[in-house]
Image (tube, rainbow, N blue to C red):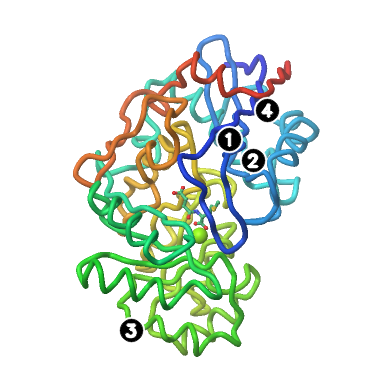
């Protein structure tokens, strides 16, 4: 099956509430969608790059540029998901852009064969338990209200974004209010240095599941040192961009890995990291990048693999958007159902998609 063309579509998705992390505040999700068209089916991929290079070096304009200039021209015309990674490998980095293109090819291909993402990836469950990621707030009172509402909705695990000046106090307040049974973890998005080790050790009192990415992306050796001086397990996010990086586990730099398909260059590499971690008895969970229903469908499929033993940042559509571009993912007893239709198993709603579209570009192959 030949690919006839590829559409790059930019959409602007206002968030239900601003999402503040240690590196910035998102109010509208600026998303690049990739649509791969063949005579028999089309497939969608969502690029998780943010509008500014603050989470990682990637950003949406750069992703669109590298796709049109290098990645799409190098893509084999024959629709073959396994061939995408090797064809794009000569181009360094740009993993989020590569992941979106590979996902769109994979979706088109699976829609033709009738297989779901979940089945193709090796999922063993038809629903996945969901956590929620809670941004930095203006006050502890506001944080407690927000967390309370999510707990009420049924989320089985809460992750608090932390940073210098917003760490021990909010974590203690949430632990005291919601008790020992709440599964609780924190994410620093690389906001600390090893000089903060004693301060971070104060979080050991709160029985956290893990602390995610406390130090800089390239501080693998420092993470290994930190791991020896705090009891809270360290989970890496930004640091792990490939299965090769996941070998950081053997350095003692982390004992848990957050797998985000965009960050690692695609769902196939994400599955390789899952397999590697599983073979070493390392827990993994599926991260989130404020995806629309398109990226969420694929993430939920990935999260249904057997090694994903911790709840992921795979929240319901309404946690992010008033109107999602697909029919909404809804929480049911703290879980999301894994789509089982061909490919992603969900389709964008054309009217909604058109309303949020800010630009489209058609690249004929
Ligand atoms: O998709 O629910 C979500 C967001 C989860 O906290 C989340 N993502 O570092 O893990 C992370 C952040 C990255 C995105 S922040 C804008
Ligand atoms: Mg993170």
Give the residue pinned by disc 4: 76
- Helix, strand, or loop for circle 4? loop
Q: CA distance from mark 2 to mark 4?
A: 13 Å
Q: CA distance from mark 3 to mark 1?
A: 43 Å
Residue 320 quadrant: top left
| Circles 2 and 1 in contact, beta carbons < 8 Å | yes
Tell me the tag on residue 102: 1
In this view, 109 is above or below 227: above
Quarter of the picture containing the C terminus is top right
Of residues 189 and 139, which is closer to you in this image?
A: 139
Q: State which tag comes first along the sequence, 4 or 1.
A: 4
Residue 4 located left or right of residue 170: right
Quarter of the picture containing the N terminus is top right
| Circles 2 and 3 in contact, beta carbons < 8 Å | no
Q: Name the spot of residue 307 as percent of width and height, x first.
A: 33, 56
Give the residue pinned by disc 3: 205
Q: Nearer the viewer, mark 3 or mark 1?
A: 3
Of residues 72 and 127, which is closer to you in this image?
A: 127
Can residue 83 be seen here? Answer: no
Disc 4: CA contacts within 10 A as few (<14), some (14-19) or many (>=20): some
Q: State which tag comes first along the sequence, 2 or 3.
A: 2
Give the residue pinned by disc 2: 98
Can residue 30 be seen here? Answer: yes
In this view, 231 is above or below 349: below
Q: Nearer the viewer, mark 4 or mark 1?
A: 1
Q: State which tag comes first along the sequence, 3 or 1.
A: 1
Q: CA distance from mark 2 to mark 3?
A: 41 Å
- Helix, strand, or loop for circle 1? helix
Q: Name the spot of residue 174 as percent of width and height, x first.
A: 32, 68
Residue 76 located left or right of residue 186: right
Residue visible at 44% across and 64% down? Answer: 139
The residue carrying mark 1 has its beta carbon less than 8 Å from ligand 1: no
């Amino acid at each position: 099956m030949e690919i006839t063309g590829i559409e790059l579509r930019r959409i602007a998705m206002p968030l239900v509430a601003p999402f503040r992390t240690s590196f910035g505040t998102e109010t509208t999700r600026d998303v690049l969608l990739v649509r791969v068209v063949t005579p028999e089916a089309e497939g969608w991929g969502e690029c998780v790059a943010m509008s500014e290079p603050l989470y990682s070096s990637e950003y949406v304009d750069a992703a669109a540029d590298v796709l049109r200039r290098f990645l799409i021209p190098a893509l084999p015309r024959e629709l073959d998901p396994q061939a995408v990674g090797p064809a794009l490998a000569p181009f360094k980095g740009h993993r989020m852009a590569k992941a979106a293109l590979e996902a769109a090819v994979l979706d088109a291909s699976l829609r033709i064969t009738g297989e779901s993402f979940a089945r193709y990836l090796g999922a063993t469950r038809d629903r996945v338990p969901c956590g929620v990621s809670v941004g930095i707030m203006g006050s502890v009172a506001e944080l407690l209200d927000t967390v309370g509402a999510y707990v009420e909705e049924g989320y089985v695990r809460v992750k608090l974004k932390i940073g210098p000046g917003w760490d021990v106090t909010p974590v203690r307040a949430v632990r005291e209010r919601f008790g020992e049974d709440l599964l609780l973890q924190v994410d620093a998005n690389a906001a600390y240095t090893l000089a903060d080790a004693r301060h971070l050790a104060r979080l050991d009192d709160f029985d956290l599941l893990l602390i995610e990415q406390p130090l800089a992306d390239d501080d693998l050796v420092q993470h290994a040192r930190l791991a020896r001086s705090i009891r809270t397990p360290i989970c890496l996010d930004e640091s792990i961009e490939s299965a090769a990086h996941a070998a950081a586990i053997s350095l003692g730099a982390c004992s848990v890995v957050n797998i985000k398909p965009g960050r690692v260059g695609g769902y196939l590499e994400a599955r390789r990291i899952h397999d590697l971690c599983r073979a070493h008895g390392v827990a993994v969970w599926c991260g989130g990048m404020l995806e629309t229903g398109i990226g969420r469908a694929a993430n939920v499929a990935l999260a249904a693999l057997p090694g994903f033993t911790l709840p992921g940042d795979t929240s319901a559509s309404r946690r992010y958007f008033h109107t999602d571009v697909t029919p909404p993912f809804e929480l049911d007893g703290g879980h999301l159902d894994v789509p089982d239709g061909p490919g992603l198993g969900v389709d964008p709603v054309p009217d909604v998609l058109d309303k949020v579209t800010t630009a489209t570009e058609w690249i004929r192959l």
